[in-house]
Image (cartoon, rainbow, N blue to C red):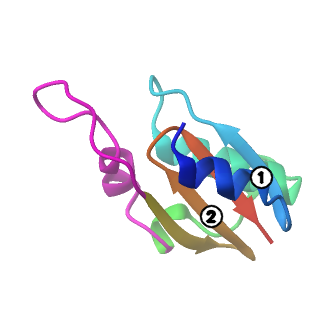
């Protein structure tokens, strides 16, 4: 786990939901699930489609392995969905904050 993620996860103020995504399923699905958990609703009922905020295909590919199988470098992306700030880290964490 990178230092940035560790530092951010240790500062739990405002974290509503966090989860580790499984690289065998799309990252966009993990984001929808985490936001739905934070909002305490079924993922099909979150109201605002993910694609209204961020391109799901681009998100799925952002931290995927390179074509030669090597992992991409560290990083993260932040965007809003519903009333939440969603941060997705390259090392497998999705953090949802109010």
Q: In terms of secondary structure, where does tag 1 sit?
A: helix
Mark 1: few/some/many CA within 10 Å (<14, 14-19, 20+): few
In the image shown, does 71 or 83 lie closer to the viewer?
A: 71
x then y, percent, for residue 9: 72, 51
* Residue 70 sits inside the magenta stretch: yes
Q: Is residue 95 visible?
A: no
Q: Which mark is residue 10?
A: 1
Verify CB contact (< 8 Å) between mark 2 and mark 1.
no
Q: Position of residue 51 (x, y in %)?
A: 46, 65
Locate residue 20 relative to residue 62 in the image: left or right: right
Q: Which mark is residue 86?
A: 2
Residue 26 is tagged as none
Give whichever of 70, 7 is nearer the camera: 7
Q: For the magenta stretch, what is the residue range?
A: 53-75
Q: Residues within 10 Å of mark 2 (few under 14, many from 20)?
A: many
Q: Position of residue 73 (x, y in %)?
A: 30, 45
Q: Name the side, left or right, on which 92 lies relative to 97.
A: left
Q: Residue furthest left?
A: 68
Return the x and y of residue 57 as percentages of the image width and height: 33, 51
Measured in 3D between alpha carbons, the distance from the residue under mark 2 to the one under mark 1, in whole angstroms, is 16 Å
Mark 2 or mark 1: whose residue is earlier in sequence: 1
Q: Is residue 95 placed above or below 2 in the rendered structure?
A: below
Q: Which residue shows up at 79% across the image and 60% down it?
A: 11
Q: Is residue 59 above or below residue 93?
A: below
Residue 52 visible in the current orientation: yes
Examine the rendered structure and indicate whether residue 72 appears above or below residue 88: above
Look at the image and tell me in which quarter the N terminus lies: top right
Residue at 60% x, 74% y is: 80
Q: Main secondary structure of the magenta part?
A: loop
Q: Secondary structure at mark 2?
A: strand
Based on the picture, tell me whether residue 69 belongs to the magenta stretch.
yes
Quadrant occupied by the C terminus: bottom right
């Amino acid at each position: 786990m990178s230092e940035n993620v560790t530092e951010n996860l240790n500062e739990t103020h405002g974290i509503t939901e966090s989860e580790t995504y499984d690289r065998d399923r799309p990252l966009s699905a993990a984001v929808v699930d985490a936001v739905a958990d934070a909002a305490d609703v079924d993922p099909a009922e979150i109201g605002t489609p993910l694609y209204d905020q961020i391109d799901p295909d681009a998100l799925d590919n952002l931290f995927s392995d390179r074509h030669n199988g090597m992992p991409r470098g560290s990083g993260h992306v932040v965007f809003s969905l519903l009333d939440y700030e969603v941060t997705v880290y390259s090392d497998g964490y999705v953090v949802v904050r109010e």
